[in-house]
Image: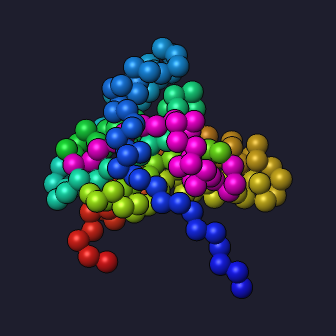
Amino acid sequence: MPRPATLPLIDWKAVFESGLDYTAWLAAAESAEQRDKLEAERRALTLDPTVAGFLAALPRPVQVVAIAEDWCGDVIRHAPVLQRMAEAGAHLRVRYISREQHPDVFVRFLTHGGEAIPKFIFLSDRFVECGTWGPMPESCRELIARGKACGDVAAARKKVAVRYEQDTTRREVVTELLRLVDIAVSPEP
């Protein structure tokens, strides 16, 4: 059996350092309307005190490379969650990049072969990739996959919209992101 191709290594530290922090990324938004939506989402979100406490007590840094662009509805919905989490813990650092800025990075994180954002890549304190998230919570990705399988993506998107409306606190997203933060700071397997 032939061996699969080996992809070139990514210098995650360089990719992270090339990204923008949230304030700079927001300032570079394509439209004031999208920037306002992002900020409204961020301001409206309150983290559970247990989550905030966990993030505040992280023992070492976790870096997140967020492939995100402000025109995308899922980015508007989920990037503010990641930002709120970063605000709760000094050791959770996020940098935003665009798809075009690092196409070699983005192509590794396609969703079922397609381009979808946001993608959040979690890195340890040594810039080792520990996990990825996106473009939406697992249950929603499953709905879309089922919609594709049965030929009715439109119905799947309606179900995703209902889930988004029901989860106003973004509990599912926070839970999934928190799990990846926990992996990135693991002291042992």
- On the rendered structure, is 165 left or right of 18? right
Q: Would residue 13 be found to the left or right of residue 54 on screen?
A: right
Please state the horizontal and vertical placement of residue 100, each as a whole percent of the image.
57, 36
What is the quadrant of residue 95 in the picture? top left
Q: Tell whether position 101 is magenta.
A: yes
The image quadrant that residue 187 belongs to is bottom left
Q: Return the residue found at the far bottom.
A: 1
Q: Quadrant of the C terminus?
A: bottom left
Name of the residue lying farthest toward the right: 151
Q: Is residue 104 magenta?
A: yes
Is residue 164 visible to us here? no
Q: Residue at x 29, y 44 (%)?
A: 93
Identified at 56% across, 39% down, the residue is: 99
Q: How many marks?
A: 0
**Quadrant (top left, top right, bottom left, bottom right) of the N terminus:** bottom right
In this picture the colour scheme is rainbow
